[in-house]
Amino acid sequence: HEWAAEAAEPPDLVVCFNSGIGTLALPLVRHWLDTVAALLRADVPVLFTCFGQKERQGETVILRHLFQAKVLVDFLDNPLKPLPEDKPTRHVRAAELTASIASVEADSDVRLCSAVVWWAKGSALGGEELQQAAEVKGPQLLKELTQSFAARGAYKGWTESLSSG
């Protein structure tokens, strides 16, 4: 988001490839909050992409509800995503997931490309409200979601894995 203060003029458009905003993971998303506020305040077209349906739902929570982004083009399947019969050859998982993590993290989303795309431009919120969303409401929401996920056992596999080494 530092670019916003330094740029002589706003960009024509911005692309956020697989930003992770939709993961709702506090350590990852909190760094995006100020950037999202700056992008929406700049009122330029922003293309957001994500890996699949889970992240799409998270982007809805953060970008559409919290930041009240104005949607230019609603969620679409990426026309350039791999077909089911495609066999990407360059992606190799560095390590296998433990069974407990795999059971929690399992989903059918192929995480090799942007499966979902959508466009936004501006926000229904004013500048001060956008800053409030970035600095106060966003971090609070992410903390509450993290606590909720933990209470429901969503991180059970990761906790077990970390505890056992």
Image (cartoon, grey):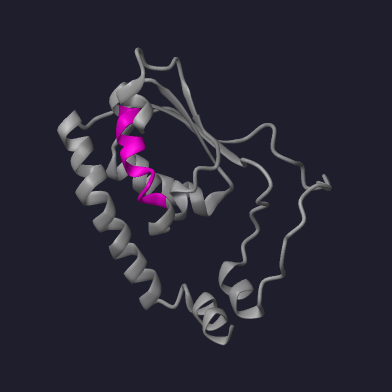
**Quick check: 153 above or below 13?**
below
User: Would you say the magenta stretch is mainly helix, strand or loop?
Assistant: helix
Q: Residue furthest front?
A: 6
**Left or right: where 78 falls relative to 33:** right
Decide whether residue 32 is among the magenta residues. Answer: yes
Q: Residue at the spot x=66%, y=42% of the render? A: 113
Q: Position of residue 59 (x, y in %)?
A: 42, 45
Report the front residue among 144 and 161: 161
Q: Residue at the spot x=53%, y=83% of the render? A: 160
User: Quarter of the image holding residue 126?
Assistant: top left
User: Quarter of the image holding residue 69?
Assistant: top left
**Left or right: where 113 falls relative to 25:** right
Q: Tell me which segment is drawn in magenta.
A: 29-40
Q: Residue at the spot x=42%, y=17% of the render? A: 11
Q: Residue at the spot x=28%, y=26% of the render? A: 41
Can residue 111 be seen at all in this image of the molecule? yes
Q: Position of residue 79 (x, y in %)?
A: 67, 32
Q: Position of residue 157 (x, y in %)?
A: 54, 78
**Quick check: 42 above or below 50?**
above
Q: Position of residue 7 (x, y in %)?
A: 36, 18
**Quick check: 38 above or below 104?**
above
**Left or right: where 3 falls relative to 94:** left
Decide whether residue 15 is among the magenta residues. Answer: no
Can residue 126 be seen at all in this image of the molecule? no
**Quick check: 1 above or below 94?**
above
